[in-house]
Image: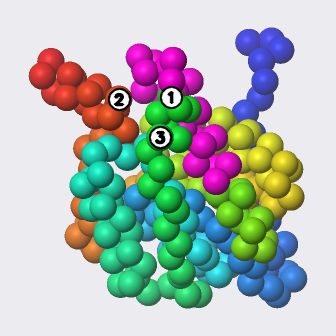
Amino acid sequence: MAGAQQKENYQRILDKTLEAIVKEGRTPRLLLHSCCAPCSSYVLEYLSQYFEITVFYYNPNIYPEEEYRERTKEQKRLIGEMKTANPIHFLEGEYDTASFYAAAKGHEKDPEGGSRCFRCYELRLREGAKTAKEGGFDYFTTTLSISPLKNAQKLNEIGIRLGQEYGVPYLQSDFKKKNGYKRSTELSSQYGLYRQDYCGCVFSRREEEAFACG
C-alpha cells in the first residue's frame, strides 16, 4: 500500500550493533527484561556471547500470584543451570499488580494483542529503562519479541522512546528471527521448563479459558 510505513528489520539492526561491540573488544552490561524462563532461554544463550546480562524479572501483570511465583522460580532455576559465555545475574522487580490494573483500566475488554497489551509493554519497559539508568547499564531490552504473538514493531518503538527518555540505549531486536522461537522451545524441553498456556494476565487467562470451552 502506497505511503504505508515500512517495517524495520530489527534483527539486521541488532547484527550491526553486535558487530560493533565485537570490534570494540568490550563486554557491555545489558539489563534484560524477561517475561518468563522459556522466552529468555534462547535470548540468554544468544546474547551472553556479547554482554554481561542481568535478567530483570518485572511482571506485575501475571495472575494469579501462585503463577507469578512459579514463573519466577523457573527463571532463577534456568539461570542457575544454563551454561553461558558470560555470567548471568538476576534481579527481581516489585510484584506491584496495582500498577498493571491501573495501566489496563478502560481496556479490560480489548482483544489479546491490542491496546491493553501495548500499555503492558510500556509499563514493563519503563521500569526496565528506569532500573537500567539507576544501575548504570549500557543497554536494556526485553525478551518479549521472541513470541510470535508479540508485536516486535511496537515493542521497539516503545523501547527506543523510553531509552531516549532515560538516557540508556534500547537494544533493538526481534528475537523470533533466526529461528529464535524454535530454539527457545528446544531449550525449554532440554531444561524441562514450565511452559504456561496463557500470556500471564487475568484477561489473557479468561480468553484462553473461553477458547478452550469453545
Work out whether 101 lies above or below 168. Answer: above
Identify the magenta region: 105-127
Please state which of residues 173 and 60 is positioned toward the viewer in this rendering: 60
* Quadrant containing the C terminus in the rendered view: top left
The x and y percentages for residue 68 are 33, 55
At x 59% / y 87%, what residue is drawn?
86
Where is mark 3, residue-wise?
98
The secondary element bearing badge 3 is classed as helix
Name of the residue lying farthest toward the top: 2
Which label is found at residue 43? none
Please state which of residues 61 and 5 is positioned toward the viewer in this rendering: 61
Where is mark 1, residue-wise?
104
The x and y percentages for residue 4 are 77, 18
122 within the magenta span = yes
The secondary element bearing badge 1 is classed as helix
Q: Decide: marks 2, 1 in contact (CB < 8 A)?
A: yes
Work out whether 195 lies above or below 56. Answer: above
Q: CA distance from mark 2 to mark 3?
A: 15 Å
Q: In this rendering, would 37 be left or right of 53?
A: left
**Tag 2: Cα neighbours inside 10 Å, few (<14), some, or many (≥20)?**
many
Q: Decide: marks 2, 3 in contact (CB < 8 A)?
A: no
Where is mark 2, residue-wise?
203
Q: Is residue 161 visible?
A: yes
The x and y percentages for residue 145 are 55, 48
At x 19% / y 29%, what residue is drawn?
209
Work out whether 96 lies above or below 2. Answer: below
